[in-house]
């Protein structure tokens, strides 16, 4: 039987316009996160009011959420990289404490 243990990590969620998704994913690639998930064509209400989804080729007219799980030391480089984007584009970043059972999948062995 496999003995599973839980290990603390950070979940990072970044919500941006579809045209900014590549900025976020390229940043995550440069920081060498182990992987990420993109959820496209989202809608919601926030600081700027209601944002409805419009399915267009490439998702440019929609909001997209990019999610990743990383060791704590990668959160600051992600935030630093997003400062430039958020200084002139709308978007938001959420960071949550999570626990994972397979730490080696997320950049720590």
Image: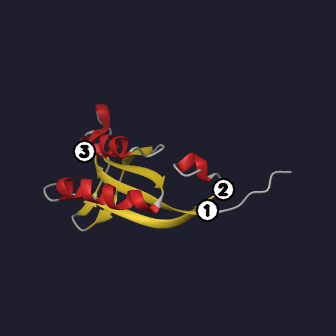
Please tell me how crowded label 2 is: few (under 14), some (14-19), or many (20+) other residues with Cα within 10 Å: few
Q: CA distance from mark 2 to mark 3?
A: 32 Å
Q: CA distance from mark 3 to mark 1?
A: 31 Å
Residue 6 point in image, percent of width and height: 66, 62
Residue 11 point in image, percent of width and height: 47, 59
Q: Identify the residue at horizontal 61%, vertical 62% (top origin).
A: 7
The residue that label 2 is drawn on is 101
Please tell me how crowded label 3 is: few (under 14), some (14-19), or many (20+) other residues with Cα within 10 Å: some
Q: Is residue 80 above or below residue 104?
A: below
Q: Residue furthest front?
A: 109
Could you tell whether 79 is left or right of 85 in the image?
right
Q: Identify the residue at horizontal 24%, vertical 41% (top origin).
A: 19
Q: Nearer the viewer, residue 109 or 68?
A: 109
Q: Is residue 56 above or below residue 12?
A: above
User: Marks 3 and 1: CB-CB under 8 Å?
Assistant: no
User: Marks 1 and 2: CB-CB under 8 Å?
Assistant: yes
Which circle's residue, 1 or 2, is located before the other in the chain?
Answer: 1
Could you tell whether 64 is left or right of 88 in the image?
right
Secondary structure of the residue carrying tag 1 is strand
Q: Nearer the viewer, residue 59 or 54?
A: 59
Residue 109 point in image, percent of width and height: 59, 50
- Determine which of the numbered discs, if any, sits on residue 7 in the image: 1
- Determine which of the numbered discs, if any, sits on residue 34 in the image: none
Could you tell whether 24 is left or right of 97 in the image?
left
Secondary structure of the residue carrying tag 3 is helix
Residue 65 point in image, percent of width and height: 38, 51
Which circle's residue, 3 or 1, is located before the other in the chain?
Answer: 1
Q: Identify the residue at horizontal 36%, vertical 41% (top origin).
A: 29
Q: Quadrant of residue 45?
A: bottom left
The residue that label 3 is drawn on is 20
Kindly report which numbered mark, 3 or 1, lies closer to the viewer in this rendering.
1
Which circle's residue, 2 or 3, is located before the other in the chain?
Answer: 3
């Amino acid at each position: 039987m496999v003995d599973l243990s839980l290990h603390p990590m950070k979940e990072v969620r970044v919500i941006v316009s579809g045209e900014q998704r590549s900025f976020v994913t390229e940043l995550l690639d440069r920081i060498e996160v182990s992987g990420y998930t993109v959820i496209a064509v989202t809608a919601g209400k926030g600081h700027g009011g209601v944002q409805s989804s419009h399915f267009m080729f490439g998702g440019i007219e929609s909001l997209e959420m990019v999610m990743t799980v990383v060791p704590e030391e990668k959160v600051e480089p992600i935030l630093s990289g997003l400062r430039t984007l958020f200084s002139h584009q709308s978007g938001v970043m959420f960071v949550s404490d999570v626990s994972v059972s397979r730490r080696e999948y997320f950049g720590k062995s």
